[in-house]
Image (cartoon, rainbow, N blue to C red):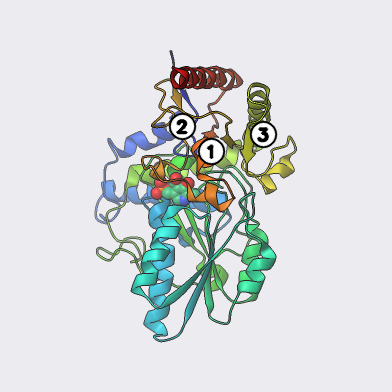
């Protein structure tokens, strides 16, 4: 039985075209891009610059604003810590208020909790509504004269809801506040254009868009707002002295190629994803009429992308999973974000939108994408039914 992979929000398969682009940089072009005195270094450096342009081209920013990292966890940590350190270096004693939400990814939530212990900052967690979205009016009301940083996730990694980033970032700018967004699950799924959106800091990761793990970027929009952040890793001076350490050349080449493909494929991929999503939700309802969808309801029109991701469904089932959770060797699904899926704790995103712990434990995050077919979705439903039937049988014994 071929296993069916429906956990694209945890990581996507690497596109074979990305692998092909990366291979030479693991083989013949193995040079260190910091080696300025020979051809191996030059060719690696050229590849890095090409990737920087490809990332910038997808986002609509300047290549000089792209700083390569190991992925979004690092980018989020860097954006938050870098800004806070910069502030206290230049304005010691001046208050620093941060606005964020209670449905952020752990890579924003946990660094903020830690930074609260290290610096005299005040962090305010705005509750999301039952669809997982931040209310623009509430953000406006919560801004104080000391608010220096606003950070909101663009597309929620568990329930797929889209925050109104255009408006939220505009409010931040009107109030001269730096705006950071975790766009990890947004790229390739909803329209992102930094030319028309007032974002100062943006985190992204290659492995959520058919690139390799261990590569990502922080976009620092110097041209936009002159935002300054302290370096995260000091040392050899790579990435204009902001993020030292020998660059992951093959990974960065993979990130660049993944961005190029996202830009090229989005016009075809998004309508197809919406079709798959609608088909899947209809099929789920056919089999489990009382199943509940978490996050906004999907629709066939492209406008859907303004409120929800087209590649996931977070579904609360009427039946219980087997003790220990749904662990089927033939079905790759998860109940929560990958970094929390090994823990017994209930998802903070699901409780933020009002689910009880028991409902959260009956919830699956089903995510799909470029390589998923309708037949796989149909087969996944059959396999899910078998798991539920087995569980019911065992509990009645
Ligand atoms: C919204 C969001 N932010 C951040 C991350 C962390 O990304 P990375 O795995 O690149 O560190 C993830 C990964 O699951 C995510 O979904």
| 194 relative to 123 in the view: left or right | right
Labelled pair 2, 3 in contact (Cβ < 8 Å): no
Is residue 388 depicted above or below 33 in this figure? Answer: above
- Residue 322 percent location from the top left of the image: 43, 27
Q: Position of residue 313 (x, y in %)?
A: 59, 36
Q: Are marks 2 and 1 in contact (CB under 8 Å)?
A: yes
- What residue is rendered at 59% in x and 36% in y? 265
For mark 3, does the 10 Å Cα neighbourhood hold few (<14), some (14 to 19), or many (20 or more) residues? many
Residue 239 sits in quarter: bottom left
Ligand 1 contact, mark 1 (Cβ < 8 Å): no
Question: Marks 1 and 3: CB-CB under 8 Å?
Answer: no
Q: Position of residue 21 (x, y in %)?
A: 41, 36
Name the residue beneath numbered marker 1: 261
Q: Which mark is residue 15?
A: 2
Q: Earlier in the sequence, mark 2 or mark 1?
A: 2
Most distant residue in the top direction = 1
- Closer to the camera in the image, 164 or 289: 289
**Above or below: residue 150 compared with residue 301:** below
Q: Residue, x 55% and y 48% (percent of image)?
A: 156
């Amino acid at each position: 039985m071929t296993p069916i992979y429906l956990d694209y929000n945890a990581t996507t398969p690497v596109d074979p075209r990305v692998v092909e682009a990366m291979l030479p940089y693991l083989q013949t072009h193995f040079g260190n891009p910091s080696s300025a005195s020979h051809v191996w270094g030059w060719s690696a450096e050229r590849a890095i610059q090409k990737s920087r342009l490809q990332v910038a081209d997808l986002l609509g920013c300047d290549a000089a604003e792209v700083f390569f990292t190991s992925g979004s966890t690092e980018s989020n940590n860097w954006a938050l810590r870098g800004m806070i350190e910069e502030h206290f270096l230049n304005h010691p004693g001046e208050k620093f208020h941060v606005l964020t939400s209670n449905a952020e990814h752990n890579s924003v939530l946990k660094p903020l909790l830690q930074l609260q212990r290290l610096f005299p900052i005040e962090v305010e967690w705005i509750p999301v509504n039952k669809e997982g979205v931040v209310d623009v009016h509430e953000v406006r009301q919560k801004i104080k004269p000391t608010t220096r940083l606003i950070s909101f996730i663009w597309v929620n990694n568990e329930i797929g809801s889209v925050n109104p980033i255009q408006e939220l970032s505009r409010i931040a700018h009107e109030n001269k506040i730096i705006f950071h967004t975790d766009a990890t699950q947004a790229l390739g799924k909803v329209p992102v254009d930094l030319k028309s959106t007032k974002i100062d800091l943006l985190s992204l990761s290659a492995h959520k868009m058919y690139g390799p793990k261990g590569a990502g970027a922080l976009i620092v929009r110097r041209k936009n707002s002159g935002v300054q952040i302290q370096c995260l890793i000091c040392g050899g001076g790579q990435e204009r002295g902001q993020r030292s350490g020998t660059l992951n050349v093959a990974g960065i080449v993979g990130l660049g190629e993944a961005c190029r493909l996202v830009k090229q494929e989005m016009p075809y991929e998004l309508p197809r994803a919406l079709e798959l999503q609608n088909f899947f939700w209809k099929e789920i309802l056919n089999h489990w009429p009382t199943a509940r969808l978490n996050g906004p309801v999907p629709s066939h029109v492209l406008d859907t992308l303004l409120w929800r991701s087209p590649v996931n469904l977070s579904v609360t089932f009427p039946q219980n999973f087997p003790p220990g959770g749904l662990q089927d060797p033939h079905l790759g699904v998860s109940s929560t974000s990958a970094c929390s899926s090994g823990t017994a704790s209930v998802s903070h995103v699901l409780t933020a939108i009002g689910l009880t712990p028991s409902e959260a434990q009956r919830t699956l995050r089903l995510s799909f994408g470029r390589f998923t077919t309708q037949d796989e979705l149909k087969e996944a439903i059959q396999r899910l039914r078998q798991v539920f039937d087995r569980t019911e049988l065992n509990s009645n014994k």
